[in-house]
Amino acid sequence: MVDTVTPQVRSAIMARVKSKGMKPEMRVRRLLHGLGYRYRLHRADLPGRPDLVFPSRRKVVFVNGCFWHLHEGCDHVRIPSSNQDYWIAKLNRNRARDERNLASLEEAGWEVMTVWECDLRDVGATADRLTDFLGEKI
């Protein structure tokens, strides 16, 4: 199947895809704030600009979309049928970048947790995982 819009129009459409403040991230932010945790957002000085940063705990949380970050074994991950070579390469680059950022953060002494979009189907379990990861509120 051929793209139905010009490359310029496709570029404009893709440029409007947000990288911050998406629904899964906002749900996690509201959940953690409601549980009494305070955090910093998208610190540019850390590899991968983590979604939530807890500086005093040296912990970060990434909230990843299952499609964009190739969550293994997830129902949300379906490679588009058109232009598959492009999408497979793009999503694999995203995954490789995530792995590099994770290694860099851990090497620098940060603990990292990833919350996947599909994890938010069970908010209670996600809240338990987050509180186990973050420990007691300060």
Image (tube, helix red, strand yellow):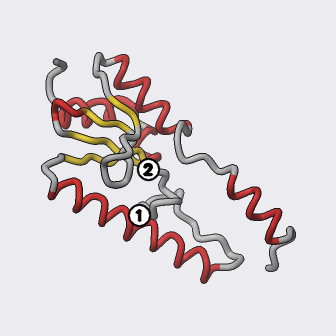
Q: Is residue 104 left or right of residue 15?
A: left
Q: Earlier in the sequence, mark 1 or mark 2?
A: 2
Residue linked to disc 2: 64
- The residue at which mark 1 appears reads as 73
Instruction: State the image coordinates of residue 24 (x, y, percent, origin top left).
Output: 49, 39
Instruction: Look at the image and tell me in which quarter the N terminus lies.
Output: bottom right
Q: CA distance from mark 1 to mark 2?
A: 14 Å
Q: Position of residue 2 (x, y in %)?
A: 81, 79
Find out whether the residues at labels 1 and 2 contact each other: C-beta distance under 8 Å.
Answer: no
17 versus 87 height, above or below: above
Residue 57 placement, left or right of 50: left
Q: Label for residue 41?
A: none
Residue 103, quarter of the rendered image = bottom left
Assign a secondary structure to mark 1: loop
Q: Outermost residue, front direction?
A: 45
Of residues 78 and 13, the one nearer the viewer is: 13
Amino acid carrying mark 2 in the image? Asn
Q: Residue at x 46, y 46 (%)?
A: 117
Residue 96 appears left or right of 130: right
Q: Quadrant of residue 85?
A: bottom right
In percent of width and height, residue 51 lies at 40, 41
* Mark 1 vs mark 2: in front: 2
Name the residue at the bottom extreme.
85
